[in-house]
Image (cartoon, rainbow, N blue to C red):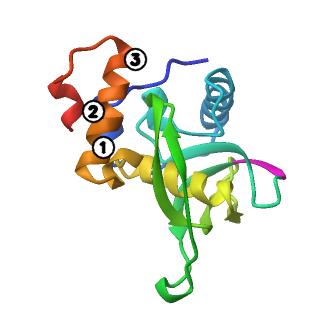
Amino acid sequence: MRPITIVGTPVLHTPCRPVEKFDDELAALADDMFESMYAAEGVGLAANQIGVDLRVFVYDCPDADEVFQKGVVVNPTLELPPADEQEFDVGGEGCLSVPGPRAALGRPNVATVHGFDLRGEPITVVGTGVLARCFQHETDHLNGILYIDHLTPEAREAVMTEFRELQGRPPADDADRT
């Protein structure tokens, strides 16, 4: 298990590098990521959330039918339905890297990720419901974007104020303003 990287840490706010080697080291990273995600009681985790600058995420998350789906996606690309076909789910979203607060955030309720498995074989996974949210959230992480970056300035400030209070940090910690 590895510690979860917290908002303000540079690796969370920069796009990650593509994975180029599909080897035992990558498989070990995925195992560490699952262990870290379960220990933190999450349903998805991107590599940069444990300080690793690589485009890989893991998930063990329910779909719209409440069936848990589990997997690893390496070098993911996200595909959303065309704008005129999107149905949005405005649900509460949180993040292991911003522990504590949650905020309402609308996301398309269907998302497809294309990428590779741990052996380098191409995969495509369609997510619905919470799984679709997870795919969007984790792909955002790999692009250096946190869910709070999608919020209005007022909603983001409310989340960050709650986060700082829970962390016992001063109200205007400039490290959180990245």
Between residues 143 and 169, which one lies in front from this camera angle?
169
- Identify the residue at horizontal 82%, vertical 60% (top origin): 65
Q: Is residue 20 visible?
A: no
Q: Which residue is mark 2?
A: 10
Q: Position of residue 51 (x, y in %)?
A: 42, 28
| Residue interval drawn in magenta | 67-71
Q: Is residue 29 visible?
A: yes
- Identify the residue at horizontal 32%, vertical 46% (top origin): 155
Q: Position of residue 134 (x, y in %)?
A: 59, 51
Q: Position of residue 41 (x, y in %)?
A: 66, 27
Name the residue at the bottom extreme. 84
SS at mark 3 in the image: helix
Between residues 25 and 72, which one lies in front from this camera angle?
72
Circles 3 and 1: CB atoms closer than 8 Å: no
Indicate the quadrant where residue 52 lies. top left
- Identify the residue at horizontal 35%, vertical 55% (top origin): 150
Of callouts 3 and 2, the N-terminal one:
2
Q: Which residue is mark 1?
A: 156
